[in-house]
Image (tube, rainbow, N blue to C red):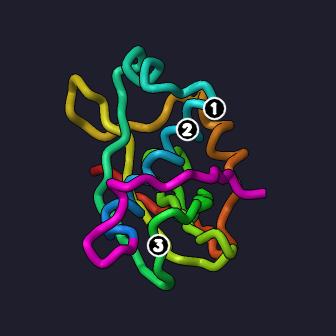
Amino acid sequence: MDFQITFNTKWSDFDPNRHMRHTAYNDYAAEVRVRFFQKQGLSINQFAKLNIGPVLFKEETSFFKEIHIGENITVNMTLEESSKGLERWKFSHQIFNEKGQLAAEVKVYGAWIDLQKRKLIGLPNTFHHIFYDLPKSENFKEILLKSKK
């Protein structure tokens, strides 16, 4: 089953056209990622102790249906791609309106960064189970990294 959260939208999520502003979709997707990792024991404080953090290379949003003021939304999260050592990853989020219709899809491609060295790193082995347990998209594939010479 997908990891998902239902949210009550708020006034600041909407634009003058009375539908959800485009960046609000990305904000909710980010909130789902943060909550997922926190539930798995990787809270913001744990990331700080490990001196690592996520870095996004690409964020892509596709819109399908409007979400209007007062609607609640459900946002899920699946793993669409990852490298073998979990250094890089791609998450997919589907955002559904109250009727259960797909309103938008947010895909983020990123990696882990060592916050002192400012270099990309892998996730510590003790946390690999988090990715193994995360639901995979139906199109899941492995990211092949170029070997260092």
Residue 35 numbered mark, or none: 2
For the residue marked with disc 1, what is the amino acid? Lys
Farthest-out residue, bottom: 64
Q: Which residue is mark 3?
A: 68
SS of the residue under disc 3:
loop
Q: Which residues are magenta?
A: 1-19
Mark 3 neighbour class, 10 Å CA radius: few under 14, some 14 to 19, many 20 or more: some
Mark 2 neighbour class, 10 Å CA radius: few under 14, some 14 to 19, many 20 or more: some
SS of the residue under disc 1:
helix
Residue 140 magenta-drawn? no
Compared to 63, does 12 lie above or below? above
Q: Position of residue 133 (x, y in %)?
A: 72, 45
For the residue marked with disc 3, what is the amino acid? His
Farthest-out residue, top: 49
2 and 1 marks in contact (CB < 8 Å): yes
For the residue marked with disc 2, what is the amino acid? Arg
Which is more N-terminal, label 3 or label 1?
Answer: 1
Q: Which residue is mark 1?
A: 39
Mark 1 vs mark 3: in front: 3
Along the viewing direction, whichever of 143 and 35 lies nearer the viewer: 35
Q: CA distance from mark 1 to mark 3?
A: 29 Å
Residue 34 horizontal side relative to residue 41, left or right: left
- Residue at (53, 48) in percent of width and height: 32
Compared to 76, does 52 lie above or below? above
Along the viewing direction, whichever of 128 and 75 lies nearer the viewer: 75
Which is more N-terminal, label 3 or label 2?
Answer: 2
- Residue at (57, 51) in percent of width and height: 7
- Residue at (59, 78) in percent of width and height: 102
